Structures are given as C-alpha cells and as structure tokens.
Amino acid sequence: MPELTADALITEVSSAASAARRTPSLLEIAGYPHLENVCSNILAFFLDPRGPHALGPLVFEALLDFQPGTIAGQARLRVHREAVTSQDKRIDILVESPEIVVGIENKIFHSPVNDFRHYSDFLDGLAAGRPTEKILLCLKDPGAGSFGGFKVLKHRELGERILVRLPFYMRHADTRFVTHLLDLINALDNLAGGSMDRMFLDTVSRRYDEVLTFLGNLKNLKTHMRTRTEELYSSFVVPPPLEESSRGSWPKANARYDDEIVSVAYVFVRSPRLQAEIAVEAVLEPMGWEIRMYPRTGIDIGGLQAAVGSAVRRKDARDDRLQFGTRLPYDADSSAVLAQFHGLLGVLSAL
C-alpha cells in the first residue's frame, strides 16, 4: 500500500468524516439535550393526546408499542410530571386513565439508582386493579440490575417506533410540533452516539498506521506549541500606567478539551484611561504567531477599536479579537514575538 502524504491523509479521512457527521439538533445548539427535566417536559407534552401538537396518542402508542389508532378514550388520559409517591419521592412522568396506569422514569446520563421497588409498589397501589406499565427510558442499556418491574426502553427504540407511526397522524398534525418532536428524537440519537459511519471506519482502518503516526505527530506539535507559549509569558513587561491583573498560558497539559491546534500566552491589564480590563494575547497556531487583544470588562470591542485607532484591525465585523502587527512565522524567535507583543502594550499605555 503506498504511503499517504499528510495532506492526502487529512483529505481522505476528513472527507469520510464529513459524510459521517451528524447535524446538531436545536436542543443541542441551545445546550440542553443532556438535561433530563427538559427531555421529560417535552415527552410529557407529546404524551398528552389532547395537546396542541394535534398528534393525538402517537407518542403514547409508540411508548407502549400499540398499533396506530388503537388507543381509545383520549380525553381520559391524564399526564403528570414529577408525580409524588407515598414516600415523597418523584416519578418523572405518570400517565393515567380509567383503563391503565403508566409510570416513566427518564434517564439521560444519570445512573438508574432510584428506588424502583417503591415506585412499582406505588404504581400498583394507584392502579387499584388496572393494568400498569412501568418503563425505564435510557440512552443506552443500563446493564444487569433489578429495576422493580420497570422495563428498559432505549430512547432510540422509542424514536424508531414514533417514526413508524408518524405518517398515520400527519394529516391533522401541526407541522411546527412535528419538527419539535423530530428534533428531540435527533438530539437523543446524537447523545446515544448514533451509529458510526462505515465509510469513515473503513478509511481509518485502511490507513490505521498512518493515522496513528499523524496523531502522534500532531500531539508532539501541540506539546511544542504549549512549551513555547509557557516560556513566553514570563518575559512580558507591562508598562505603566497599565496595571497587570493576571498572566499565563493555555491550554494546560491536562486540559479537558483537545479539539483546537492553538496555544496562547496572555496578560490581563487594566487601563486607567479606558477604565477597562483588556486581555493581550500572543497566539500560536501552525500558521504562525498573531498578537491580539480583546476587552474583558468596562468597554466593548467597538469602543476598544475606536480608542486604539488604526493600530489594530478586525478580520470582519463578527471577530471578537483585534489584531496588531503582522503575522510572524511559526519558528520566529521569541524576541521577535515579544517585540510585537510589547508594541501593543505600548500603544495601550500611551492612551
């Protein structure tokens, strides 16, 4: 097998990854997909067949794996959130009608360590002879354990059941709420990890050794970048009347995030003239060094740019950093980087 150049390897693997990439749901964009309360609120809304979604008993039928159209007495179904038990514990969702009682405990990332035996006894007592269904909704199989008669149902399986039944209810449905329901299904599927795209797996498998070599070289590059910025910030000299409040570098060696190829040395200074705190950064990327700054408190980006004038620039109106000087090559001597960095500090001190 011919060896790939780094460029060819990146192109091939990234092309496969692009094909595998999932689109984010609105819940993920908002930052809420992992919150059980948010998920349970949405589920409870769609479980109520009388809701404004006009999907009738679609989600309830999917939950119990009934055939579409088999739920009678829709108006008699009552959906409750955080149903309080006889021991003042709470069941996430309770659905009750004269014909059935359904208890649902919804788990996203939390472990199923609830008192399921008590929940089960409470539901049996509440049912007073009516049939009961006890469901533990999970992203993934919780493994072996005693769940007090609660049946495990994975969110993905519930989503598949909903999608199969959805055409039956589309005629009268409010399409806005159909979009919301599909968004929830997509968000939970993404949280569960989805299924890895075969094209991406095949590409990485075929180029396994080269991918490992590339990742090792990338790790070494990040370490080198981090070393350079860690060495740099100790040489910063803050001229008066600027007042230093902090200095350092990021990311650290034990950083929890590792998805960017960048390392930054910074100093936070307070400008008495502007009555603002400003971050000044020496940013190292594979393309080279840039000296940037941005306001932390007391002034916005536009005000800072107006105060400094033509000495700084923004790449575009959305950029939240002001650039100073010219980009320096990656292997530029530290003295050249410091000279440009101190040049920006000098501009701020002269205001």
Image (cartoon, rainbow, N blue to C red):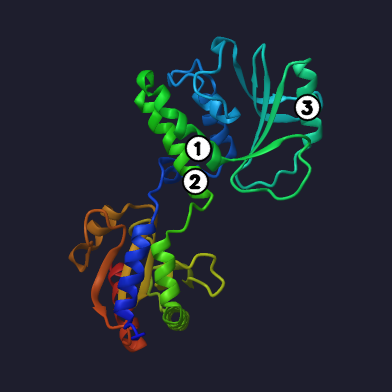
Q: CA distance from mark 1 to mark 2?
A: 8 Å
Residue name at image x 42 percent, y 38 percent: 183
Q: Earlier in the sequence, mark 1 or mark 2?
A: 1
Residue beneath disc 3: 88
Residue name at image x 45 percent, y 73 percent: 205
Neighbourhood count class around disc 3 (C-alpha, 10 Å): few under 14, some 14–19, many 20 upward: few
Residue beneath disc 2: 189
Would you say the residues marked 1 and 2 are in contact, meaning their CB atoms lie under 8 Å apart?
Answer: yes
81 or 67, which is in the foreground? 67
Residue beneath disc 1: 159
Would you say the residues marked 3 and 1 are in contact, meaning their CB atoms lie under 8 Å apart?
Answer: no
Kind of residue sitting beneath label 3: Asp
- Where does the image place residue 125, in percent across and percent down from the top left? 80, 19
Mark 1 vs mark 2: give the one in front.
Answer: 1
Q: Secondary structure at mark 3?
A: loop
- Where does the image place residue 143, in percent across and percent down from the top left? 70, 50
Q: Quadrant of the N terminus?
A: bottom left
In the rendered image, the vertical position of residue 330 relative to residue 72, given as above or below: below
Residue name at image x 58 percent, y 35 percent: 37
Residue name at image x 36 percent, y 74 percent: 282
Query: Does residue 244 appear to the left or right of 350 in the view shown?
Result: right
Q: Secondary structure at mark 2?
A: helix
Would you say the residues marked 3 and 2 are in contact, meaning their CB atoms lie under 8 Å apart?
Answer: no
- From this viewpoint, is residue 269 visible? no
